Image: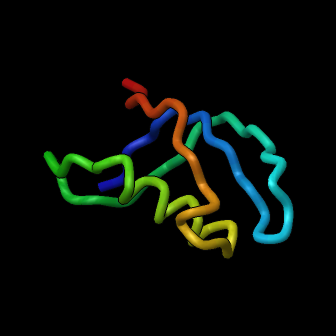
Amino acid sequence: MRTKFYTRFLLRSAEECDADEYSGVVEVKHTSGQVLEPDEIEALLAQNFELDAENVELLNWSRLH
């Protein structure tokens, strides 16, 4: 099952202390009723951007209906 979420997050590159803010719709494939914790969401976003999870800071995450 795929679920869409509106998200806002910061990305920091490994060599810079500045962060870029991103927002938009993210589609996640997961089992029905599964609740994703913030650290799991940060890990998923980091994986997509080929970064370490420490370089992602989740600001907002809400399911779209």
- State the residue at coordinates (80%, 44%): 20
Locate residue 41 relative to residue 1 in the image: left or right: right
Q: How many marks?
A: 0
Q: Position of residue 26 (x, y in %)?
A: 55, 45
Note whether 14 is above or below 59 in the view shown: below
Quadrant including the N terminus: bottom left
Residue closest to the far front: 17
Q: Position of residue 31 (x, y in %)?
A: 20, 58
- State the residue at coordinates (78%, 46%): 19
Q: How is the image coloured?
A: rainbow
Locate residue 11 relative to residue 39 in the image: left or right: right
Q: Position of residue 56 (x, y in %)?
A: 60, 55
Q: Nearer the viewer, residue 53 or 49?
A: 53
Locate residue 63 relative to residue 12 in the image: left or right: left
- State the residue at coordinates (47%, 64%): 43
- State the residue at coordinates (85%, 61%): 16
Q: Nearer the viewer, residue 10 or 23?
A: 10
Q: Nearer the viewer, residue 3 or 23?
A: 23
Residue closest to the far left: 33
Q: Position of residue 34 (x, y in %)?
A: 18, 51
Quadrant including the C terminus: top left
